[in-house]
Amino acid sequence: MTKKVRIENADTSNYKVMVEIWDKGYPEGQPDTLAKTIKLDHPTQMTGDDCYLTSTRYIVVKEAPAA
């Protein structure tokens, strides 16, 4: 199953959002790999069409480190 998702920076503060898309390690036991990083720097900014989940992919959403 592939599930497309959208993530929005819905806050008007100066804090930014970092979205990391990770692929699970294969074969099992191998380290996960970071496939893509998306920065949401502005209010109402959203991820695009390349943000999706599968059985081997997951998403981490966190506050971006200060510049």
Image: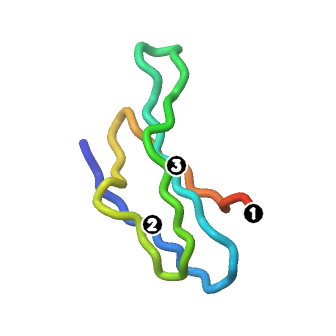
Q: Residue at x 54, y 21 (%)?
A: 31
What's the amino acid at mark 1?
A: Ala
Which residue position holds label 1? Answer: 66
Tell me the colour scheme of the image: rainbow
Mark 3 vs mark 1: in front: 1
Q: Classify residue 27 by image quadrant.
A: top left
Q: CA distance from mark 3 to mark 1?
A: 16 Å
Q: Which residue is mark 2?
A: 7
Which amino acid lies under the numbered mark 2 shown in the image of this protein? Ile
The image position of residue 2, as x and y in percent, is 26, 46
With respect to residue 5, does 11 lie above or below?
below
Image position of 53 with respect to 15: above or below: above
Give the distance between the C-alpha atoms of the residues marked 1 and 2, in whole angstroms.
Answer: 20 Å
In this view, the residue farthest toward the left is 1
Q: Are there few (<14), some (14-19), or many (20+) residues within 10 Å of tag 2?
A: some
Q: Which residue position is annotated with label 3? A: 20
Q: How far from the left and from the top, in percent, is residue 37?
A: 50, 50
The residue lying at 60 percent from left, 81 percent from top is: 11
Cβ–Cβ under 8 Å for marks 1 and 2? no
Report the residue that reaches farthest toward the right: 66
Picture coordinates of residue 43, whole percent (x, y): 54, 82
The secondary structure type at the circle numbered 1 is loop
Q: Residues within 10 Å of mark 3 (few under 14, many from 20)?
A: some
Q: Residue placed at 24% from the left, 42% from the top?
A: 1
Label 1 CA crowd tier, 10 Å (few <14, some 14–19, many 20+): few
Residue displayed at 46% across by 15% down: 28
